[in-house]
Structure formats: C-alpha cells, structure tokens
Image (cartoon, helix red, strand yellow):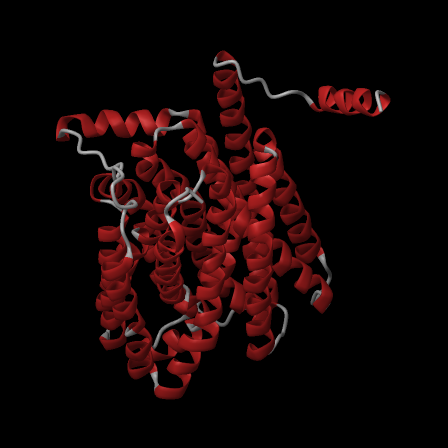
Amino acid sequence: MNEGYGPRAWVVWGVGLFCYAVVVMHRTSLGVAGLEAAAHFGTTPGVISTFVVLQLAVYAIAQVPIGLLLDRFGSRALLTAGALCAGGGQVLLALADDLPMAYVARVLLGVGDACIFNSVLRLLPRWFAPRLVPVLSQVTGMFSALGQIAAVGIALPLIQGFGWTTGLLLAASTTLVAAAATATLVRNAPAGEPTAVVVDPIRKIPANIAEVVKHPATQLGFWIHFTAGFSMNTFVFMWGMPYLMVGQGLSQLAAAGLFTLLSAASMVAGPIMGALTAKHPLRRSNLSLLVIGPLILIWAVVLAWPGRAPLPLLILLVIVLAVNGPGTGIGFDFPRTNLPVTRLGAANGVVIAGGFTGGTLLILAMGIFLDRIAGGGDYTAEHLRLAWLLQVPFFVVGLSGFLLSRRRLRRRMAADGVIVPSWREVVERIRRQRGTR
C-alpha cells in the first residue's frame, strides 16, 4: 500500500468490492433461476437464454464506451450510476409481464453491470503500491464468486419463497445500499493527489480508442480473457445448471452445491493466481496457458464419458472452471504494465469484453442449437452434451489469437530492451546457479 493512505484505501476498495458482489448477484440471477423465469414468462429455457445473451452482449459492447467514461469521470461516478442502473433493470424485470419489457430490463442490467468491475480495477493503481495490484486485482475478481453464491443463497430463495415479483424486488433493494455506499465513501484518488482522469477533445476519441485497441498488450489481454472466460461464463450464466440437472441427472440442490463449490474454489484460486502473476511477470502468459489447458482436457473427458459422468469428475470440472475465472484476470496485467494509467479504463474495457463476447456467442449458439435439435420439446442429456461440443471452435480461435498477440507483444518488448528468456535458457541458468553453490 502507498504510504500515508492508511485504512482509507481499504475502505474505498472494500466498498467497491461490495458493490461488485451485489451487481454480480443480479447478473447471475437468471443462471440459477432460469427455470423459474421460464415458468413466469410461459416460455422455454432456450428463450430465457436470449435474456442472458442480450444482457451479456450489452455488457461486452458497452465496455469500451464505459471505459472512456471511466477515464473521464472516475470510478466513484461510474460505480454509483452502474449500481442504480443494474437495480433499475432488476426492478423492471420483476414487474415485467411480457418478453419485450424483460429484454429492456436486461439491457439496463447489462449497462449497469458494465460500469462496475472496470471501475473497481481502476481504483487499485491509485490507492495501492504496484507490487500489490496483481494480487488485489485477483481478489477483486474473486468477489464475483461471492455474488454467484449470493445468487444461489439469496436471490433464488427469495424468488422461490416470495414469488417472482416480490422476490426480485427484495433482491433489487440491495443495489440502493451499494449505490449509497459508493457515493458516500468511494474517492477516485487519495486527497491531494491527481485523480488521473483524462478529458480528450471529442475529435481525438476515435484515434485514442484505435491506439488502445491496436496495442498488443490490450490484444493479448483480450484473448486471455476470451479463452479462459467464455466456457465459465456460459456455464455460470445459462447452461451450467440445465447441464448438471438434465444432462447429469443431479437434483437442484446438488447442482446448486456444485455452483457454490465453483464460487468457493474461485475465491481460493484468485489470490494464488495474483501472487504468481506478481512473482513471475515475464511468465504471465504461460501461467494462463497452464489454466486453460486443463480446462480443455477436463471438458474432453466429461463430454466423452459414456452416460452420466461420476460425481468426482463433475467436481473436478467445476474446480477447473473456477480456476479459469481468476485466469481471466491475468489479462488485465498486460495493459496495466504497458499502457498509461489514463488509458486503463478503455484498455480494461477491451479486455473485459473478451470472455463476455465469447460467452455471449456460445450461449446464443447453444440456445439455437438446442431449440432446433429438440424440435420445441424438452432437452435430453445427449442434446446438452452435443451443445457443449460447440466450445471447440471457440478454443481454437482463442488460442490462435493468444499466440499471435503474444508474439507481437514480445517483439515490442524486445525493441524496448525487455527480453523474455526461453525455457531452455531458464533451465540452464538454474543449473549454473546450483552448480556454484
């Protein structure tokens, strides 16, 4: 922590974390209450998946514009506005009786949600020392797990206990608390220090966006977030619960337990991932490959398993998915260390769009595929297994983008005098060091 900021830094960050967890609870509410939503609107889970697709599409598309607003107005304003917008979306969804109004509600939620995580990330370089930022960034992302747990433990019981409208309204009230707390307690920077906001002429905005997007650090961050994030987002936001219940024959209680395990495992993995990122800054991209590789492998085993997969294998699946949640956070470290702080809002917005763009496209593709293969009937376990195989081209595209952008970034780093040694050179250096002892 920067000297002199004292407990205030932790208060500012803590309030941002609370706001983030609250909004994530609302973001993931349809992922755990999709069947209740289908019953309320008298439609199929496939149609309900379009709610999530719309919400996540808005979230992804809004990231760069929101990032520009964040660079201009700072975290406090965006956190407050985002919480109120997300809460308004949930209130409208609670009162909606038809699909068009429900779609408008998800748009509002998507816009509000897009304001939150990036705003909390932008606080960290202003309030904490650089050596702590990678770990605190991962801990920030970890609080999405608390939001997911709250969706299972708060939002879903409220909807089941009080009905769709009353339950959602009660849950939405938490956003008022979050908005009030951020408006009162969050500050963009410590007293007496510049707030690091930028006010560019409007004519320069397109060129500035292009500069941020073209930077290989931003592109590598995007592809890391995409490849590590699309599968988990699809699982958490829409198709995980139906897959566990219909595809694997678990009860709702057992499936909810696996969702809770996923959230808890993500919370454990986050600080570890942050510490490794901080300790090995030249091996951050390799670390991301070490979390993406097992994800591809475990999905291959689960989807190839004849019949229902054994519970230990499903537990392993959700744990690996959980680790890839913090794995997406590695992507933010590349813009942070290669771009000026005044551009981090826009750059982080591009990175965040990665996993959510992939998740949105996969949720949509799976929904269309399932509705067509089921012919309007109920989904079967085989239908869901085939639908999850649609991940394959996403992994291919993601890894290709990852490798190409990493090569460009390393060439740029080399031009600046920063050389990433090969593994052979690392092993040889370790061998020589041991030989001199």
| Up-down relation of residue 251 to residue 239 (above or below) | below
Instruction: Tell me the residue at 46%/47% (across/down).
Output: 137
**48, 419: nearer the viewer:** 419
Q: Position of residue 8 (x, y in %)?
A: 35, 54
| Up-down relation of residue 176 to residue 182 (above or below) | below
Q: Position of residue 125 (x, y in %)?
A: 39, 40
Q: Is residue 314 left or right of residue 368?
A: right
Q: Position of residue 399 (x, y in %)?
A: 56, 35
Residue sitting farthest toward the front: 4
Q: How many marks?
A: 0
Q: Quadrant of residue 288?
A: top right
Q: Is residue 36 visible?
A: yes
Instruction: Tell me the residue at 53%/52% (across/down).
Output: 325
Q: Quadrant of residue 303?
A: bottom right
Instruction: Tell me the residue at 14%/31% (across/down).
Output: 202
Q: Is residue 389 visible?
A: no
**47, 101: nearer the viewer:** 101
Q: Quadrant of residue 307?
A: bottom right
| Up-down relation of residue 347 to residue 185 (above or below) | above
**65, 428: nearer the viewer:** 428
| Quadrant housing the N terminus | top left
| Quadrant housing the C terminus | top right
Q: Position of residue 428 (x, y in %)?
A: 78, 20
